[in-house]
Amino acid sequence: MTINLQNFFQYYDSDNLNHVEAVSLLAKEMPEELLKPSAGWIILYRGGRLEAGSINLHNFFEFYNDKAFIHLEGVSQLSLELPPKLLDESADWVEKYRTKYTPPTPSVLNVPYFSQVDNYRDAHRTCNSSACAMVLEYLKPGTLIGPKGDDAYVKKVFAIGDTTDHAVQTKVLQSYEVESHFNRDLSFEDLDEQLAKGIPVVIGILHRGTLLNPTGGHMLVVIGKTSKGDYVVNDPYGSLNDNYRGPVLNGKGAIYTRDILSYRWCPAGSDGWGRIFEEKK
């Protein structure tokens, strides 16, 4: 039975990995001349324009508009020019396209959440301590007991220095036999690498102001990544998504998009502030 190629273009979803793989299969099996800029169906699809450059078949699927006559014409012409076997219900690419897609479950580490707003002192400025305390309790469960367990950690910090001093945080973590180091040159690749090892990362973001003019200074914990490439965080002050005006628990498992973090965390691509922890023993 012959398929209706228009439907495959119309319902293409670039977030569906089965659709993406199916179109890749189709491209491999198509005659080479049909993937050249001079191919008749491509010229029709582009409204009569002959453009130079290699062809990416995914783009024609992704930007297909069933209300655009030139797109309808182009795909109709492609249907006429494709070998019949590629328009058969049993074609490999068709079966792959129609296979039900289940998005991967976001990989999120089970990092306990501590709020800074209930800290016994300096609640408005102890984000660094509460963030480090979350990772400490994740790496060494049972070290900090109860929902206000980070108070014990905060007391150790103020016993030798200030919460904003990263060297002090390193020393306090060492007192719990946890090794870490603070960096000012991290990238998203560093986050991904640590998460793949099962280790959260404490990062510092500019949490105030606009994306084009971010200000402030705030520490939180990156605990996972979604299938779309955004990051799951434990933010001790609440959620950036509601401008820190909602309940503080909105910061537990909040999703901060990669786009937002690219402005607020590492605008140059590799200038992110953050604390890297040794692997969990």
Image: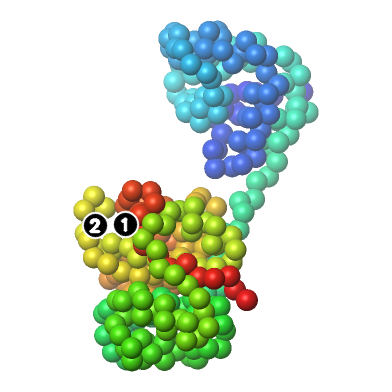
Picture quadrant where residue 139 is located: bottom right
Label 1 crowd (10 A; few <14 / some 14-19 / many >=20): many
What residue did someone put label 2 on? Answer: 214
Give 107 or 180, whichever is nearer the viewer. Answer: 180
Position in image of residue 106 (x %, y %): 57, 59
The reply to whether residue 109 is in sight is no
Q: Which mark is residue 264?
A: 1
* Secondary structure found at label 1: helix
Mark 1: which amino acid?
A: Arg
- Quadrant containing the C terminus is bottom right
Q: Residue at x 26, y 53 (%)?
A: 211
Q: Residue at x 48, y 16 (%)?
A: 53
Position in image of residue 82 (x %, y %): 67, 14
Give 280 or 215, whichever is nearer the viewer. Answer: 280
The reply to whether residue 68 is in sight is yes
Picture quadrant where residue 261 is located: bottom left
Vertical comparison of 274 with 22: above or below = below
Vertical comparison of 157 with 100: above or below = below
Q: Which mark is residue 82?
A: none
Q: CA distance from mark 2 to mark 1?
A: 6 Å
Whether label 2 touches label 1, CB < 8 Å:
yes
